[in-house]
Image (cartoon, helix red, strand yellow):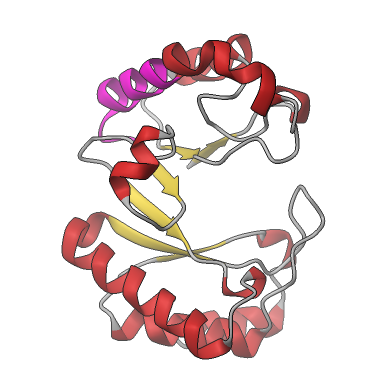
Amino acid sequence: MYWIVLHKFEGYWISPLANHGALRRALDEIWHKNIKVMLDLETPLVAPWRYVVGWKDFTRNKAMIQQFVDEANPQVILCEKPGDDERLRSWGLSYVGEVERIKMVYTSIMLRKRKHRESLLRNVCEAGVEKYGVKFKIGLGCIAKGVTKLERLLSPEALYHDLKIASECGVDEAVIYRLGGLNETYLDVINKFI
C-alpha cells in the first residue's frame, strides 16, 4: 500500500491541521488511481507550529479528507490511534466509511505498567474485531526509530507477546511499524504467527 506522508514542515502526517496545499497535493497525486492507500491520521507532532496556524484550514481539510475516504473506498486504510471513535472524528483523526482500519497500539512507547499495556491492547483488539470484523488490523511497534527518533523499541519478546494477544482476540492481520528495524530475530517471531 502507498503510505502518504507530507514534508515535516507541512505536518508530516495526515490531519486537518496539516498544510492545506500540501494535503491537496498529496491526495491529488493518488485521488483517482487504483492503488491501496494508507492515511496515517496523527497530529503534527514534528511541526508544532501547525497546532497554531493549522486551525484556519481545519474545517476544509477535514472535509477534503472525508471526501477522499468516500471516493477512494475501498482502497483506503485508515491508521488511527485507539480511543473513542466519535472524539477522534471530531478532531479529524478518524473518518466514517466502510474502509479497513488499523488501530495503533505501540506498547513499546506506553508509560503504563505491563498489565495495563496488555489490557489496553486486548481491549482495542476485541473492540476492533467486534466493530470492524475482517476490516480491522492492529498496529504494533515500533521496532526501529521513527521520524521523531524518540520511540522506545519493541523487543522481539514483547512483539511475540503482543502478536499472541492479537491472535487470541481474533485479529487476522497486524501491521508492524518501522520495518527498517526488521531483522532475523523479528522475522523468527513473525513466522510463528504465519
- Please provide the residue range marked out in magenta: 62-77
Number of labelled discs? 0
User: Residue at 74% of width from left, 33% of height from top?
Assistant: 48
Image quarter of residue 174: bottom left
Name the spot of residue 3 as percent of width and height, x first: 55, 39
88 or 186: which is nearer to us?
88
Please, which residue is most extreme toward the front here? 52
Residue 22 visible to an observer of this rendering: yes
Please, which residue is most extreme toward the right here? 149
Residue 147 highlighted magenta (yes or no): no
Name the spot of residue 55 as percent of width and height, x first: 56, 18
11 or 189: which is nearer to us?
11
The answer to whether 6 is drawn above or below residue 151 in the figure is above
The answer to whether 158 is drawn above or below residue 93 in the figure is below
Name the spot of residue 39 as percent of width and height, x first: 47, 37
Give the main secondary structure of the magenta stretch.
helix
User: Residue at 35% of width from left, 37% of height from top?
Assistant: 89
Name the spot of residue 56 as percent of width and height, x first: 56, 11
User: Residue at 75% of width from left, 32% of height from top?
Assistant: 47
Q: Is residue 156 left or right of residue 147?
A: left
Residue 76 highlighted magenta (yes or no): yes
Q: Is residue 170 left or right of residue 180?
A: left
Q: Is residue 67 left or right of residue 11?
A: left
Quadrant of image for the C terminus: bottom left
Residue 193 visible to an observer of this rendering: no
